[in-house]
């Protein structure tokens, strides 16, 4: 079990209490939640966006999909999904598609879906497709201390 060094160092420096949980490899956040026997609402996923000058990370439950128009309205700016190449450039120590929903340690502004604030336990990819990070909700808030909060996603089902 391993997590991205950038994330691990950040969590240790902040004194974040966390557990690592191995799981069968999965290629989507919702698939990872199923593989780890975790409710989709407790599994956080990050979506990297760009406003043309800066990147940011939108964090929401794995069971939700992004409403980009709502996020644009929430933030008052034009946004687009970042390309795979842009994501790989920012999250250099993470496997493709396994980015952690912790933008602070990668220099990204973060906005968190309000539904995540109601979770007692939060799980997320730690940088690979076989290890989950588990933290309490209050610890997750400490991971993204400057994050904005808003409503910009909806359940897939």
Image: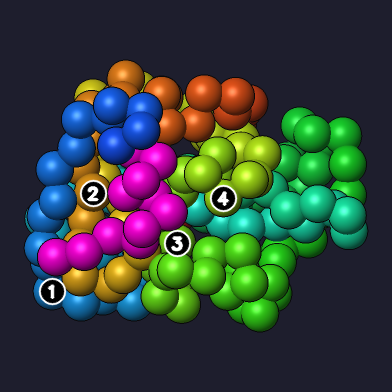
Which quadrant: the N terminus? Answer: bottom left
Q: Position of residue 98 (x, y in %)?
A: 40, 67
Q: Which residue is mark 1?
A: 24
At horizontal 72% and vertical 41% (from top left) the residue drawn is 71
Q: Which residue is mark 3?
A: 99
Q: Which residue is mark 2?
A: 133
In the rendered structure, which disc, 4 or 3, sits on the residue that comes first in sequence? 3
Residue density around tag 2, few if under 14, some if 14–19, many if 20 or more, within 10 Å? some
Which stretch did the figure color magenta? Answer: 1-11
Q: Mark 4, mark 2: which one is toward the viewer? A: 4
Q: Are marks 1 and 2 in contact (CB under 8 Å)?
A: no
Q: Position of residue 137 (x, y in %)?
A: 30, 25
Which element carries disc 1, helix, strand or loop?
loop
The answer to whether any part of residue 39 appears in the image is: no
Which quadrant: the C terminus? Answer: bottom left
In the rendered view, tell whether residue 35 sits above or below residue 21: below
Distance between the Cα atoms at labels 1 and 2?
14 Å
């Amino acid at each position: 079990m391993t997590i991205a060094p950038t994330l691990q160092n950040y969590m240790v420096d902040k004194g974040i209490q966390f557990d690592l949980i191995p799981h069968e490899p999965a290629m989507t956040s919702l698939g990872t939640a199923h593989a780890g026997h975790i409710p989709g609402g407790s599994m956080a996923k990050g979506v990297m966006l760009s406003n043309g000058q800066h990147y940011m990370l939108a964090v929401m439950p794995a069971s939700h999909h992004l409403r980009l128009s709502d996020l644009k309205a929430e933030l008052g700016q034009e946004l687009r999904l970042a390309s795979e190449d842009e994501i790989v450039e920012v999250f250099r120590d993470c496997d493709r598609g396994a980015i952690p929903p912790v933008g602070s340690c990668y220099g990204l502004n973060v906005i968190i879906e309000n539904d995540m604030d109601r979770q007692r336990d939060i799980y997320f990819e730690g940088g690979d497709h076989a290890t989950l990070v588990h933290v309490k909700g209050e610890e997750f808030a400490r991971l993204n201390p400057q994050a904005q909060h808003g409503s910009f996603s909806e359940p897939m089902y």
